[in-house]
Every structure is written in C-alpha cells, then in structure tokens.
Amino acid sequence: MDATGSTDSTEHVDARRRDYYAGMLMAAVGLGAIYDGIRYSIGTLSQMGPGFFPVSIGVALVCTGVAIAVVARYAAPQDGEKKLAPERKAWCFILGSIVAFIVLGKYGGLVPATFAIVFISALGDRENTIWRALLLAAGMTVLCVLVFWWALSLQFPLFQWG
C-alpha cells in the first residue's frame, strides 16, 4: 500500500480487466453487425450491396476489440498508475449530444444537428474550452456538409423547419 491507502497493482489489474471486457464487448458488437449484415447481399467493392458496410464495420470492430483485449490481457504492469474518477460529466454531455442530434436532425436539418452533436460532446472534455468546442463544431459542420451533402448527395436537408 502507498500513502493514499491504495495499491498500484490492484488499480492496474482493474484497468486491465476493464479494457479486456471492453475489447470483448466491442468484438461481440462487431460479430452482431456481421451476423445481421450477411443476411443482405454483400456484393463486391465495385458493386457494393446493402450488407457490405455493416459487415465491413463489423470486421473492423471485431479486429479492434480482439486487439484491445489481447493487449489488456498481456500488458506488463506499469508503476505509478492512478485510478481515475468516473467521467460522469462527459457521459452526460455525450448522451445529450446524441439526443440533440436526433431531435435537430428531424426538425432542424443536417447543419444544426451536426453542429450540436460536435459542440455538446466537445464540452464533455475537461480540457476543452467553449471557443475550442465552437471552432471544432464549425469545422466539422463544414466538413460534414462537404462530404455528406455535396460529395455523396445524401438526402438530408441542410436546414428544415418543423
């Protein structure tokens, strides 16, 4: 035990266990996406079917999840690691941003929905300022409009009222 009354080895084991379970959960979600995606036509790279994207994302999730779990399982203990407090504020901002995106996407359009999700979730980072969050949200909104509305011609109005 150290001066604070906790042991570094148990904290490290807890963090590794959390990472291991998170990696396995990520792999399970990926397997679910693959399972649902293969029920549709996958197609080829030049003629993608409706199942291509879910299967591709599922494979990426499985690979990433397994990699996280393997690293967490076999990582060497590190000295001086401290246990961090749960980020309740960040979770609230992230969940709130998703709700704002859903509501504004339906009633406001792509631009306000994108700005809201990026701005609100950026406020969840304790090192972020309001100005940095505004700048990030503005930049991501411009990028989103260029990619999804202009380049991909996504049928999502930029602005709509009601």
Image (tube, rainbow, N blue to C red):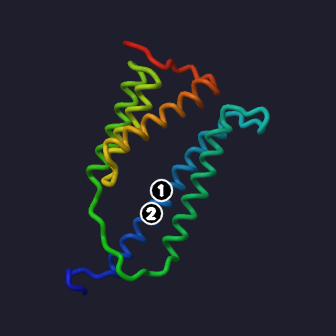
Image: 54 above or below 128: above
Judging by the rendered image, the residue that carries numbered circle 2 is 21
Callouts 2 and 1 close, C-beta under 8 Å:
yes
Q: Quadrant of the C terminus?
A: top left
Q: Position of residue 59 (x, y in %)?
A: 63, 51
Q: Amino acid at mark 2?
A: Tyr
Separation of marks 2 and 1 at Cα, in angstroms: 6 Å
Label 2 sits on a secondary structure element that is helix
The mark total stands at 2
Q: Nearer the viewer, residue 32 or 135?
A: 135
Q: Residue at left 60%, top 45%?
A: 57
Q: Residue at x 30, y 70 (%)?
A: 83
In this view, the residue in front, 33 or 89, is 89
What kind of residue is marked 1?
Answer: Leu
Mark 1 surroundings within 10 Å by alpha-carbon count, few (fewer than 14), some (14 through 19), many (20 or more): some
Which residue is situated farthest in the top direction here? 162
Q: Is residue 49 left or right of residue 11?
A: right
Residue 37, quarter of the rendered image: top right
In the picture of the structure, the residue carrying the numbered disc 1 is 25
**Secondary structure of residue under mark 1:** helix
Q: Residue furthest bottom?
A: 1
Residue at x 57%, y 58% (from the top left corner): 64
Instruction: Point out residue 66 in the picture as x, y percentages from the top left corner.
Output: 57, 62
Q: Residue at x 54, y 59 (%)?
A: 65
Name the spot of residue 147 as percent of width and height, x first. Answer: 60, 31
Question: With 11 as the anchor, is 27 left or right in this view?
Answer: right
Q: Quadrant of the N terminus?
A: bottom left
